[in-house]
Image (spheres, grey):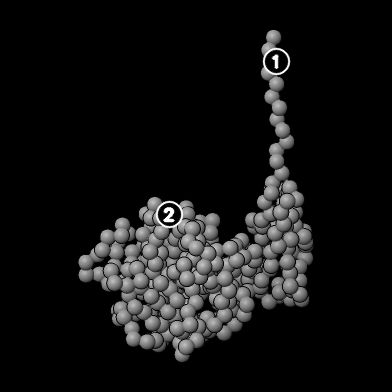
C-alpha cells in the first residue's frame, strides 16, 4: 500500500509595507488624495474646518501590515504628521509623511526643485510641497540612468532673467521603450499627479491633471521659449516630410474632485473653461510673454469642487509619441489670474 503524504507549509508572511488607500470623509476634502509611493508622501486636500479640527482617515494597507497611528485615529496638524507602516513579516517598515496641499497665489516661478531618491528625476516644489508632476516617473520605468539630465523634464538655469525654469525636451527612446514601440519621450509637465500604477497598462490615464481652485480664472499668463527639433517623426520613428514640431501649453478649468487625465483632458464634459497659448510661431528668440483669456463653454457651470490644470509638452503630439527629438520648451513665471 502506498501512502501519499503532502506537506503544506505555512504561507510566508507578507514583507510589503504600503499604504494602498487613504480615505477621508468626502465632505472634508476638496480633491482626491494622492499617495506618492515613490517619495513616501500622502498629499491631502482639506477644507479649512477639516484642517482646523483634524481628520480620522481610514487606511487600507498591504496584507497583514499595521500602522502607527492606527487606521481611524484622529490626526491634527499642529505638528508634522507621519504614519509608520510595519509589514506582516516584520522585515520592513515604511514611513509616510502627510502633506496638506494649499496653493496660494497661483504664481509659479520654479526656483526650488527636489529629486526622486531612487530614480533621480527632478520636480519643482511650491511651499516645499510637490504639486507639479511630469512624465518622468513613466520614463524611469524604462531603465534610464538615475540622474536628472537623463530625463525629458528637469530644471534649467536658463529661466527668465537668468533664474531657474522648467525645461521640457523631447529625447530618444531607449532599448526597452523601443521594444514597446515608443521611439521618443516628449517632455511633459503638469499640475497634478502621475499614477505609476497606470504607466504601463494605460500611459495616458497615468497623467492625472488638476489642483483645487477657489476662484474664477480670468487669464493664463507666463513666459516661454521654444526651439523645435530638426526632424519630425511619426510613431514608428519615420521622418515626416514637411512637418515641424510645435509645443503645447494650456490651462483647463473643470469640475472635480476627480482629476482628468490624458484620455479626456480635451474632451470631458466636466471642462468649464480653457486657455491655450498659440503655438503657430514654432521658434522663438529669447523668452516670449503670453497672456491668454479663459474661454468659457456655454451652458456649463462651476460646481463645489472646481479644479484647474496647467499642461505643457515639448511636442504637441507627444501623447502619441510623435515629435522631433531635440525639441526644447522652457516655461517660467506661469500664473493663473482670477477675475
Q: Nearer the viewer, residue 299 or 138?
A: 138
Q: Position of residue 312 (x, y in %)?
A: 43, 73
Q: Nearer the viewer, residue 180 or 144?
A: 144
User: Quarter of the image containing the N terminus?
Assistant: top right
Mark 1 → mark 2, Cα distance in angstroms: 51 Å
**What residue is shown with label 1?**
3
Residue found at the very far left of the displayed protein = 241
Determine whether, in the image, residue 233 is placed left or right of residue 270: left
Q: Position of residue 57 (x, y in %)?
A: 71, 62
Mark 1 and mark 2 lie on one chain; the one further toward the N terminus is 1
Determine whether, in the image, residue 91 is placed left or right of residue 287: right
Position above or below: 161 against 29:
below
Report the mark closest to the observer, 1 or 2.
2
Determine whether, in the image, residue 41 is placed left or right of residue 295: right
**What residue is shown with label 2?**
176
Q: Position of residue 47 (x, y in %)?
A: 66, 74
> In which quadrant of the rendered view does residue 299 lie?
bottom left
Task: Give the structural element (helix, strand or loop) at label 1.
Answer: loop
Circle 1 crowding by C-alpha within 10 Å: few under 14, some 14–19, many from 20: few
Q: Position of residue 251 (x, y in %)?
A: 45, 76
Q: Let me know if residue 307 appears in the view.
A: no
Amino acid at each position: 500500500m502506498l501512502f501519499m503524504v503532502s506537506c503544506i507549509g505555512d504561507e510566508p508572511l507578507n514583507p510589503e509595507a504600503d499604504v494602498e488607500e487613504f480615505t477621508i470623509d468626502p465632505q472634508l476634502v476638496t480633491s482626491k488624495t494622492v499617495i506618492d509611493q515613490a517619495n513616501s508622501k500622502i498629499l491631502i486636500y482639506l477644507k479649512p474646518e477639516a484642517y482646523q479640527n483634524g481628520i480620522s482617515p481610514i487606511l487600507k494597507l498591504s496584507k497583514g501590515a499595521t500602522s502607527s497611528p492606527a487606521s481611524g485615529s484622529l490626526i491634527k496638524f499642529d505638528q508634522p504628521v507621519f504614519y509608520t507602516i510595519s509589514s506582516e513579516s516584520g522585515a520592513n517598515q515604511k514611513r509616510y509623511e502627510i502633506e496638506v496641499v494649499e496653493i496660494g497665489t497661483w504664481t509659479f516661478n520654479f526656483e526650488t526643485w527636489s529629486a526622486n531618491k531612487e530614480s533621480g528625476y527632478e520636480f519643482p516644489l511650491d511651499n516645499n510641497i510637490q504639486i507639479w508632476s511630469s512624465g518622468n516617473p513613466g520614463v524611469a520605468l524604462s531603465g534610464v540612468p538615475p540622474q536628472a539630465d537623463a530625463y525629458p523634464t528637469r530644471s534649467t538655469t536658463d529661466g527668465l532673467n537668468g533664474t531657474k525654469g522648467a525645461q521640457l525636451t523631447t529625447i530618444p527612446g531607449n532599448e526597452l521603450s523601443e521594444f514597446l514601440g515608443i521611439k521618443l519621450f516628449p517632455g511633459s509637465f503638469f499640475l497634478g499627479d502621475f499614477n505609476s500604477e497606470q504607466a504601463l497598462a494605460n500611459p495616458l490615464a497615468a497623467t492625472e491633471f488638476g489642483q483645487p481652485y477657489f476662484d474664477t480664472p480670468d487669464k493664463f499668463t507666463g513666459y516661454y521659449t521654444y526651439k523645435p527639433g530638426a526632424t519630425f517623426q511619426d510613431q514608428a520613428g519615420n521622418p515626416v516630410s514637411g512637418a515641424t514640431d510645435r509645443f503645447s501649453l494650456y490651462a483647463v478649468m473643470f469640475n472635480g474632485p476627480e482629476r482628468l487625465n490624458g484620455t479626456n483632458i480635451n474632451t470631458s464634459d466636466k471642462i468649464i473653461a480653457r486657455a491655450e497659448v498659440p503655438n503657430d510661431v514654432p521658434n522663438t528668440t529669447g523668452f516670449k510673454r503670453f497672456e491668454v483669456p479663459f474661454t468659457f463653454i456655454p451652458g456649463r457651470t462651476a460646481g463645489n469642487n472646481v479644479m484647474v490644470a496647467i499642461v505643457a509638452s515639448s511636442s504637441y503630439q507627444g501623447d502619441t509619441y510623435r515629435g522631433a527629438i531635440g525639441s526644447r520648451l522652457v516655461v517660467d513665471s506661469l500664473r493663473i489670474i482670477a477675475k
